[in-house]
Amino acid sequence: MGKLRVGVAGLGTVGAGLVKLFADPRSRLNEKLELVAVSARDRARARGVDVSRYRWFDDAVEMAASPDVDVVVELIGGADGTAKAMVEAALKRGANVVTANKALVATHGVALIQMAEASGAKLLFEAAVGGGVPMVKALKESVAGCRADAVTGILNGTCNYILTEMETSGRSFGDVLREAQQMGYAEADPTTDVGGFDAAHKLAILCAIAFGARPDLEHVRIEGIERVTLTDIRLAGKLGFRIKLIAKGASTDGGVEMHVRPALLAFDHPLANIGGSLNALVVDAEPVGQLTFIGRGAGEGPTASSVASDLMDIAEDRASAAFGKPLALLADAPRAAPPERGRYYLRFLVGDRPGVVAAISERLAHEDISIESFLQMPVHEGPAVPIVLTTQACARAAVERAVKAIEALEVVTEPPYVMPVEPSARGWRAN
Ligand SMILES: NC(=O)c1ccc[n+]([C@@H]2O[C@H](COP(=O)([O-])OP(=O)(O)OC[C@H]3O[C@@H](n4cnc5c(N)ncnc54)[C@H](OP(=O)(O)O)[C@@H]3O)[C@@H](O)[C@H]2O)c1
């Protein structure tokens, strides 16, 4: 049998990285595959790699529909538009598709797999989650025979970079974000990243595979890192914690619970030392126990290598079902409530007056919430001073009521900020 003919649409960071890998004589890609066609918007653009020897398509959908292309690679991005149209065109005619597009897979995964199953095509997307880290494969294959209980990840490199830089350089969220934008680490409109939406796309995909359920982006509770201040990072550090944007999914008796939000991690938590643009995933599964996967979550090389790995699976005829099993076998898992009990970090900004601490403690005690650690720093944020504390394990509803009561105090100058403390022992129910 001849080599599989590959067409790549999108020649930006990831696409150019893939073309370079095809051009590397020591890559195994060329043993069974051959890059024959490319597509992007601007044919004249320099891409750091020669694309002139491949057939050029101005229209990516036309390339996806071409009978001269056996495997279609979509590296354009976006949940809709050309990316979706070209993937549909390929799947409808039975051509296998590889994509790095988490927005597309998280939003339209079910419909796309229906098309793939109808035509007998495969849809693979290792690069869509965790860049170069083989998270999809680990869940689909390595723990396939286990019962997955939880996946907990650092899935957005931009947020992780910002939080790490704030901690190490002592600069504010705004300053670090501006610098990240200038250096090309963050988008001009950073909402998708800092708002937690990118991590939510990835989490929805991982949970579908881990828990054998249909991808369910709408049920991810999402909170970004915009409210995390330098004070939070410093004071949490003094209390023995690091702040990370955590994407977590858990399979419980009541269904699947998924959330993306900043959380405090004790320094010995497996994710606490994942710095900069690294990504990581902790999988809790029985009977294997806890597994941790770490690596570069973005960038040309790591992401192209995940795309290449999917291409090799297709070439060597070992590509598995998109979410690990056929669509008909994926459950419609109900949305579970977040855990009822946990430990929390609370930050209040208050007027610098006597009696404030007593007033806060009183309202916490009224809700039966015990304080685990407490810090009042002599740093002023405008006319106010921050007070932060962590609670012992307590009821989530009680914390919500106490925080509301404290917010109503006249001395409290802005809405309190609450973050969960991640359980440090292994397992979702470790608290
Ligand atoms: N960058 C990463 O580290 C990374 C990591 C994981 C996953 N991903 C995912 O990989 C995908 C690609 O990301 P990227 O960072 O490589 O994006 P990028 O650098 O912005 O490149 C996008 C490419 O798509 C091309 N394009 C845009 N509209 C097109 C259209 N209508 N028809 C044909 N081509 C079109 C652009 O063409 P021109 O160059 O001519 O403008 C460009 O080459 C996205 O889904 C992203 O989420 C990226």
Image: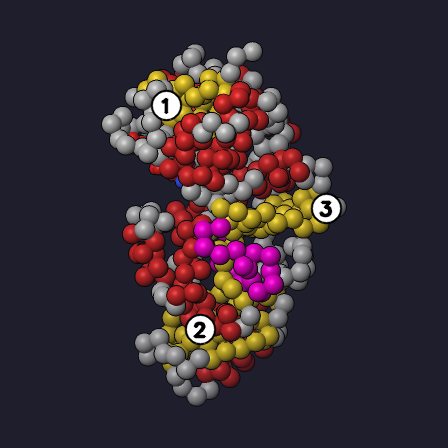
Distance between the Cα atoms at labels 1 and 3? Answer: 42 Å
Q: Is residue 337 above or below residue 8?
A: below
Q: Amino acid at mark 1?
A: Val
Tag 2 secondary structure:
strand
Ligand 1, by image quadrant, is top left
Give percent across and percent down for residue 156. Answer: 46, 49
Tag 3 secondary structure:
loop
Give percent across and percent down for residue 187. Answer: 33, 47
**Residue wearing tag 3:** 288
Let me know if residue 413 appears in the view. Answer: yes
Q: Nearer the viewer, residue 411 or 24?
A: 24
Magenta residue span? 259-278
Tag 1 secondary structure:
strand
Disc 1 and disc 3 in contact, CB within 8 angstroms: no
Give percent across and percent down for residue 244. Answer: 49, 58
Q: Residue furthest right?
A: 287
Q: Nearer the viewer, residue 290 or 324?
A: 290
Residue 348 - label: 2
Dot 2 crowding, Cα within 10 Å, few <14, some 14–19, many 20+: many
Distance between the Cα atoms at labels 2 and 1? Answer: 54 Å
Let me know if residue 107 appears in the view. Answer: no
Dot 1 crowding, Cα within 10 Å, few <14, some 14–19, many 20+: many
Q: Amino acid at mark 2?
A: Phe
Q: Nearer the viewer, residue 54 or 59?
A: 54
**Residue wearing tag 1:** 38
Q: Is residue 122 above or below residue 420?
A: above
For the image, the number of numbered tags is 3
Say which of marks 1 and 3 sits in front: 1
Indicate if the residue with disc 3 has its beta carbon within 8 Å of ligand 1. Answer: no
